[in-house]
Amino acid sequence: MRIGYARAIEEDLDCQKQRALFEEFGCDVIHIESHSSPKQRTELDRMLDAVAPGDRIIVMKLHVLADSTRQLVDLVEALEEKSAFLHAVKENIDIAKGTSFSFLEIAKSIAEFQSDAISAKTKAGLSEAKQKGMHAGRPRKPDANVKKAIEMYKSKSYSLAEIKEQTGISKSTLYRYLEN
């Protein structure tokens, strides 16, 4: 049996691309998570409980299935114990009997997977921080200091070093504000 597994990822938030892929591969059963969170993966658990020998799990990319290399290894081991196979389409990995891969292909796929996992975790953290009202990047300089630095610069009575010393505003920051 061909089983599709999907969850929301950055490039397919509504899982439509993954659904189309499953149609293309003729999946008999499709499991789609209702959220993108790495926790509470109920559909993944349901799929793993139901998988039978010879079943083929199809995912768009490795990052859909796992959030870390350790989790990926654990999932592949669980599939092997049940004599089931994994096919990660984007990475062109099909772990069917008799298939072999070069070390370079494996290393590239794992490196890309790690990158996807880190990127997803970073984006999730930034999104969560933004919802809490926090902002990414360097903190802005206080407006009073910026105004004072601009006034000092326009008076032409102070050097850039003196402006920086008194206001804490660097030359590049001052010029950036002057351009606006």
Image: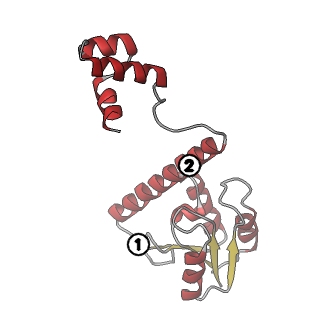
Foreground tag (2 vs 1): 2
SS category of the residue bearing label 2 = helix
Residue 100 is left or right of residue 48, and the answer is left
The amino acid on which the numbered mark 2 sits, given as a three-letter code, is: Lys
x%, y% of residue 73?
56, 57
SS category of the residue bearing label 1 = loop
Q: Residue at x 56, y 83 (%)?
A: 20
Task: Locate residue 79: give its quadrant.
Answer: bottom right
Quarter the C terminus occupies? top left
Q: Residue at x 41, y 55 (%)?
A: 111
Question: Looking at the image, is 141 positioned above or below residue 180?
Answer: above
x%, y% of residue 161?
26, 13
Q: In the image, which disc is placed on residue 121?
A: 2
How far separated are the C-alphas under marks 2 and 1? 31 Å
Q: Residue at x 69, y 62 (%)?
A: 35
Quarter the N terminus occupies? bottom right
Question: Looking at the image, is 84 positioned above or below residue 169?
Answer: below
Task: Indicate how the structure is coloured in the image.
Answer: secondary structure
Residue 104 is left or right of residue 1, and the answer is left
x%, y% of residue 16?
59, 77
> Is the C-beta separation of discs 2 and 1 under 8 Å?
no
Q: Is residue 142 visible?
A: no
N-term mark: 2 or 1? 1
Q: Counting other residues with Cα less than 10 Å from the Cα at mark 1, is it few (<14), some (14-19), or many (20 or more)? A: few
Q: Is residue 7 visible?
A: yes
Q: In the image, which disc is placed on residue 100?
A: 1
Considering depth in this image, is 68 or 174 the residue closer to the camera?
A: 174
Q: Residue at x 48, y 25 (%)?
A: 143
Considering depth in this image, is 131 or 47 the residue closer to the camera?
A: 131
Considering depth in this image, is 26 or 118 the residue closer to the camera?
A: 118
The amino acid on which the numbered mark 1 sits, given as a three-letter code, is: Ser
Task: Locate residue 176: give its quadrant.
Answer: top left
